Image (cartoon, rainbow, N blue to C red):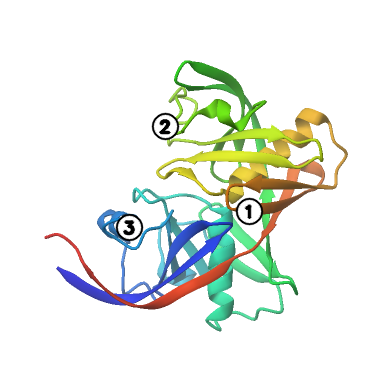
Amino acid sequence: MASTFAWAKGHGTENDYIVLPDYDGGVHGDLSKELVTTLCHRRRGLGADGVLRVVRSSSIHGVPETDAEWFMDYRNPDGSVAQMCGNGARVFVRFLAESGLVDPTGPIRFGTRSGTKTATIAEDGSICVDMGTVELQGSVEIAVGDRSWKAHKISVGNPHAVVFVDSLEEAGPLQETPEYDVSDFPDGVNVEFVRPEADGELSMRVYERGAGETRSCGTGACAAAVAHVVTEDLVTPTTIRVGVLGGTLEVPVDTGNEVKLSGPAVIVAQGELELRLAG
């Protein structure tokens, strides 16, 4: 079975996404798991860390109400629904701006499953997204092989476990999902391994639920920044730089753990795709 539709490819600090324009919801409907997994597969598809469907808020159902015109319908590469994606949000905003769907000079509002977000595009092209309040929810235990650590349980609209380590190599190759108590994270969890550096910057590796280890994670950077601020009792407002495999993100942290996420986002390709699915 073959279908033809518009697509684009973008990335934020090498966290890469397939963007599907589906403005009135008539092209992809509920966005099937088969379509998402095929698109994201790096050998039998286009390859990506997730899919961003661009749809009008009035044309998608079963999501939080928003008065923003556009909604970011985000899916993990295994086809599961995700509440929020920080790097994906910047790519989403870049697509809206380059497609003429929003005014790039003003605040850009859009809906997500974790609420309405606002973004701005700076003169240097970087995109800053107001991520809202990061919630600290106590501590949990995370294990990889025969190693285990106490981690900060954190919500950035999606679930995170932040582990501070002396070396990022402690996490090993991260080829398997880190172990955790399912009662702590019934819907899965993103796990960040974080090393504070001498210059105040953080270095981070991340295992994303439904994706494996990725080059970056925007919400993970937000979770790591807040965990660091709380652990070190830093005065806010402050800005934490987070180095990931794909580049550097900046996380301004305000009082009450209100955070923003700032970094690059680019659209690298777009066109029409004829995709053949089994069946």
Which residue is pictured at 15% across the width and 59% down the height? 278
Decide if residue 231 is on the left or right side of residue 80.
right
Q: Residue at x 75, y 74 (%)?
A: 123
Q: At which x and y percent is residue 227? A: 70, 34
Query: Which quarter of the figure is the C terminus placed in?
Result: bottom left
SS of the residue under disc 1: strand
Q: Position of residue 20 (x, y in %)?
A: 40, 70
| Label 3 vs 1, first from the N-terminus | 3
Q: Secondary structure at mark 3?
A: helix
Residue drawn at x 74%, y 71% is 122
- The residue beneath circle 2 is 177
- How far apart are labels 3 and 1 at the CA level? 26 Å
- Of the numbered discs 1 and 2, the one sitting upstream in the chain is 2
User: To which quarter of the image does residue 106 belong?
Assistant: bottom right
Closer to the camera in the image, 139 or 246? 246
Element type at mark 2: loop
Q: Which residue is mark 3?
A: 36
